[in-house]
Image (cartoon, grey):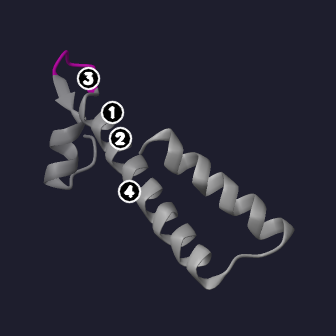
Amino acid sequence: MDQKKIARINELYHKEKKEGLSPEEKEEQVRLREEYIESFRRNLRGQLDRIDILEKDGSITHVKDLYKKGKKRP
């Protein structure tokens, strides 16, 4: 998500607190927030996919493999 959209989210938030939003602005706010959350989740998943866990026995467990299999760490 680019900085212009983040700035718009903040602008709408402050306007909502001061004077309220029109129905169109409220709709825009909801859409932008959903886009922001989706972007956040994608970025977090990308970071987690790059994490490897060194187990006590010396083996390496890839977090992305645990997520794909739906398993918890042994």
The residue under label 3 is which amino acid type? Answer: Glu
For the C terminus, the image quarter is top left
Q: Nearer the viewer, mark 4 or mark 3?
A: 4
Query: Where are the magenta residues, as a range?
Result: 52-59
Up/down of 27 relative to 29, above or below: below
User: Label for residue 62?
Assistant: none
As measured in the structure, the alpha-carbon distance from the residue carrying label 4 to the one carrying label 1 is: 14 Å
Which amino acid, mark 2?
Asn
Quadrant containing the N terminus in the rendered view: top left
Q: Tag 1: residue type?
A: Gln
Name the amino acid, label 4.
Glu
Residue matched to label 3: 55
Q: Quadrant of residue 23?
A: bottom right
- On screen, residue 53 versus residue 29, left or right, reads left
**Residue at the image point whose x is 16% and y is 20% from the top:** 59
Tell me if residue 55 comes above or below residue 7 in the rendering: above
Query: Who comes first in sequence, dot 3 or dot 1?
Result: 1
Mark 1 and mark 4 in contact (Cβ < 8 Å)? Answer: no
SS under mark 4: helix
Q: Nearer the viewer, mark 3 or mark 2?
A: 2
Q: Which residue lies under the disc numbered 2? A: 43
Give the alpha-carbon distance from disc 4 to disc 3, as whole Å: 32 Å
Q: Are marks 1 and 2 in contact (CB under 8 Å)?
A: yes
Q: Main secondary structure of the magenta part?
A: loop
Q: Nearer the viewer, mark 3 or mark 1?
A: 1
Whether 21 is drawn above or below 71: the answer is below
Q: Where residue 47 is drawn, which disc sits there?
A: 1
As drawn, the residue found furthest toward the right would be: 18
Is label 1 or label 2 in front?
A: 2
Task: Residue 9 in the image: state x and y as whole percent.
Answer: 60, 56
Q: Report the residue marked by disc 4.
A: 38
